[in-house]
Image (cartoon, grey):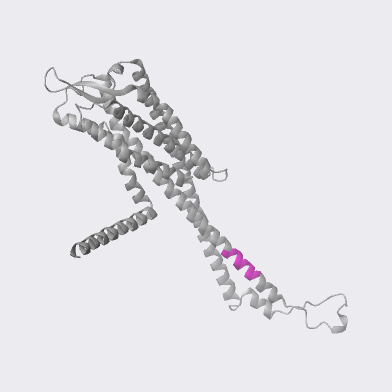
Amino acid sequence: STRTAILALACFDILSCVLCIPGEILDLRFSHSFTSQSLCKGFRTLTTIVLIASGFTLLTVALDRYQRICNPLHQQLTSKQAAYRVAISCVLATILAVPAAIIYGIAFVQTPRDNFYGMECSTSQSFKNHPLRIAYSAILCVLFLAAFITMIIIYIFIGRQVVKQTQFRHSVQQRKGSIGSFRRHTVGSDNSSDGGHSFSDKLKDSPVLPETIPEDDIPSSIKVPDKPATHTVTRMESRLARKHSVLSRFRKMSHSVDARTRKTTMMLFFITLVFVVSFLPHLVLKAIQAMNKNFVENLSTNGVIFYNIFVRSYFFNTAANAFVYGFCSPKFRNECRILFFKLAFWFKSSTISAKTEDLM
């Protein structure tokens, strides 16, 4: 399920980098001469779908992490169910993005020259002060805050459970260490008092039946065992050794699975944190703009540049997620290294072949 969610988030990041960010670059490049209504509506709607779907996917990831960490004995989410949740997130995001296709469009904007107006891709001119735009902005803001608060609460519960599990493991290891030292001390004292003989050696040396009993006095119903008691003790010792080996292997596997689960949870928490933090500059600027209608018009040239960058801060997470994967996942780093070497080898081979063709 985690793999499915990470692949979905990676697909959303690719869509943002390949389609949404180039659309924003076009908007900045043609800030006063953007004339394509369909292109404006298209990339604005796609951006809204990708952002909402990413938020819903991260919310389902948080719920899945809570189930795995806090309720590990309950039924867990399968890959198929995770794919269904991602599909539902995409459908809900598409439905919620329908008003964006209506609201966004070409708007007239004042240029630095007097009595000259340009065209930009923004809220359509007919929806500047429309109740639909205000209601839609309020709905998106409420959804973001609700998802944000829910994910904070979920990860607080997860963090508390991880701390409890860590403390429990430490206490168990300390008890195991104290019991082991007590056993070693007891066995050592027994060996020193008995001349260094073990329990099995004692059984070998001790008689099974008294030697003074005459052979005629032994009842015929009593059968002397064919195998000595030392064989039974040896067999019990081997069984205990095998059981101890199986238990130790199971503990190691359980510890590695728990460590991998915690590491994956930490990586997904960082991805969620980056996603939420990347939205904050956008929300702050939009709130200021809602309270002050002439906020953008009163900015200096440098202020407009910084405004245009940070009002699109929700794209920061698409670039930062790759670094989060690389920081938290050694497998991702190795795969990137292999891909880099393959690309470098291919580029070098193509350069050599091109030079060879030029010489021929």
Instruction: Name the image quarter holding residue 7.
Output: top left
Main secondary structure of the magenta stretch: helix
**In the shown orientation, is residue 183 left or right of residue 86?**
right
Q: Camera-side residue: 263 or 313?
A: 313
Is residue 156 visible in the rendered structure shown here? Answer: no
Check the image and name the residue furthest to the front.
360
Choose top left, top right, bottom left or bottom right for residue 89: top left
Q: Residue 122 versus residue 56: which sits nearer the camera? A: 122
Up the image or down, 226 lies above or below 340; here it is below
In the image, is residue 254 part of the stretch drawn in magenta? no
In which quadrant is the C terminus drawn?
A: bottom left
Q: Residue drawn at (23%, 19%), measured in percent from left and top?
A: 293
User: Residue 242 colored magenta?
Assistant: yes
Rendering coords of residue 54 (x, y %): 39, 36
Residue 194 screen position, x and y as percent? 61, 76
The residue that appears at 73% across and 80% down in the rendered structure is 207
In magenta, the rendered stretch is 236-245
Q: Position of residue 106 (x, y in %)?
A: 26, 23
- Give above or below for 103 relative to 207: above
Q: Is residue 297 left or right of residue 285?
A: left
- Residue 81 lies, in percent from the top left, at 52, 41
Please state which of residues 211 and 24 is positioned toward the viewer in this rendering. Answer: 24
